[in-house]
Amino acid sequence: MSLRRRDATPDLEQRLSAVQAAVGAGAGILPEPVAATGLALVTQAGERLGHGLEHTVVALAGATGSGKSSLFNALAGEDLSRVGVTRPTTSTTHACWWGPDASGLLDWLQVPRRHHAAADPDLSGLVLLDLPDHDSTAVEHRREVDRVVRVADVVVWVLDPQKYADRAVHEGYLRPLAHHAGVLLVVLHQADRLGPEQLAACRADLGRLLADEGLEGVSLLTTSVRAEGGTEPLRAALEERVQAHRSAIGRLEADLVAYADVLGDGCGGPTPRSRPHDRRAVTAALADAAGVDAVVRAVSASHRSQAVAATGWPATRWLRRLRPDPLRRLHLGRAVGAGGRTSLPPASAASVARVETTVLGVASEAAAGLPLAWADAVHDEAAARLGTLPARLDASIAATDLGSSRRPVWWRAVGGVQVVLAVVAIIGALWLAALAGLAYLQLSELASPDVGPVPLPTAMLLGGILAGLLLAVLSRILSSIGAQRRARRARARLEEGVAEVARTEVFEPVAGVLDRHVRYCEAVEVAAGRARTT
């Protein structure tokens, strides 16, 4: 038999799958009892459908003295249940079935006392259960009633004229079945005890009570085992349900609606996503905490230091090499890959507080409009990432290629020129030294050419030194410009890495919870039968 409903309503199997999807999406957020109830519902539905739809399980429930056992016997045509008035007489569930063998189904229902009634085509497929009295002083009796009421395809609640308004019945059993009006029958039994006017007033008052409990659409019948044809209204209602073969599905659908109503408390309005200024704020806070400014300053200083070492005056260039490179002090200078660590100082308390405030603020904005449990889940997800951010930021800084290994071509050219100028100055100095030595020894002087009014050796010495110093100053000016350019490129790369950390460690986790909430609410809609399935 097909389980498909009208085209406008989701298929039952898809609705059961939607319950599993909702529980999965809400894992860790739904209270454990709620999640367990959903999984138990899916398991119960699968087991019930596994026994087929040819049988309809009808449970007669009621209080002591309500007459449900006498009603059970009247429908069965035999005295199967012992009848009592003032104390519980039904201690275990009794079963009577008509038509095909229902042993497997009764085994699943855990009903040991069973009777196969004589053939009756109008009731073929009916499995009628007489439950213990719900108001029994024996705890196991009440537990048995609760257990069977949760799995029966149809529940017939038998009330008597004296106790039909009993609060224990209405609050403990009828009110929770507000979603099950289609699979619930309320019977005002022992109608023969009332006159016509009293019976009408009693029915009207009971109908009002049921309407107040959300059961205004429930079938309300009056019966009597003493009056001629007094059980016919109930028998006719049971025949209709048995022959329709829809009660099992109707019960499961009602269970799904009731459970989806519980899950629906976790669905709120549309949830805003992160906005561009949120991303900029988080990236800026993380960049500050990661020490991006300090690294950029080190990149600039390192570039200038390398430039001086490569293009400075050779006589003082070696002094620059004695100074430690600013980047190397921080264990930076080239992309070291995942797992690398820097020697950057830890973030200040103010920076840490700024990161925490910004990240949690983004989470709060993203969770605006969500039910409390889901809003807490978004906040907790963001808060959990705060502990991993320092290591992730440090690794990102360490893995960033700062471009420090690339040297401009002009450095080598200028360095070569500086060497030439130094050699020229040295030759001029040696030449002058030779001339001074010859003069000191009063030997014949060596003629030296002139460059204008200045002797060539002097011109070589002074020209080499002055030109070298001038070139060094010019190189410093150019290297400062290059340092600024390299610092800007380094900042862009560092901030790109920080933005990636923000994406993977803040925005994606928060969005993941929000996406779970969307999937959860979509599944709830399907489970409730309010969404079309494909």
Image: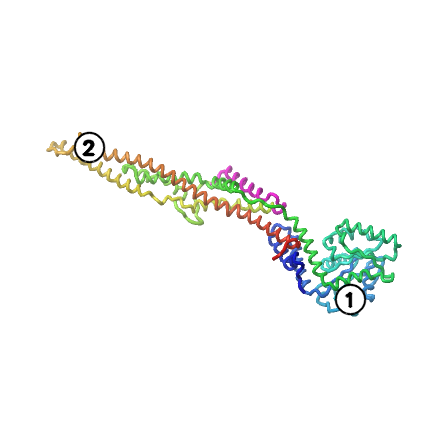
- Residue 490 appears at what percent x and percent y? 41, 42
**Disc 2 element:** helix
Neighbour tally class for label 2: few under 14, some 14-19, many 20 plus, Cα within 10 Å: some
Residue type of the residue flagged with mark 1:
Asp
Outermost residue, right direction?
195
Which residue corresponds to mark 2? 458
Q: Earlier in the sequence, mark 1 or mark 2?
A: 1
Residue 379 visible in rendering: no
Task: Give residue 122's mark.
Answer: 1
Highlighted range, magenta: 346-374
Quadrant of res 383: top right
Instruction: Report the residue at 75% width, 57% height from top.
Output: 184
Instruction: Report the residue at 24% width, 38% height from top.
Output: 421
Q: Main secondary structure of the magenta part?
A: helix
**Disc 1 element:** helix
Between the residue at mark 1 and the residue at mark 2, the CA separation in whole angstroms equals 132 Å
Instruction: Report the residue at 21% width, 37% height from top.
Output: 424
Q: Is residue 11 left or right of residue 501?
A: right
Instruction: Report the residue at 25% width, 34% height from top.
Output: 465
State which quarter of the image contains the N terminus.
bottom right
Of residues 55 and 363, the one drawn nearer to the viewer in this rendering: 55
* Residue 519 position (above or below residue 130): above
- Residue 146 appears at what percent x and percent y? 74, 57
Q: Is residue 488 left or right of residue 206?
A: left
Residue type of the residue flagged with mark 2:
Thr
- Residue 90 appears at what percent x and percent y? 80, 61
- Residue 242 appears at what percent x and percent y? 75, 63
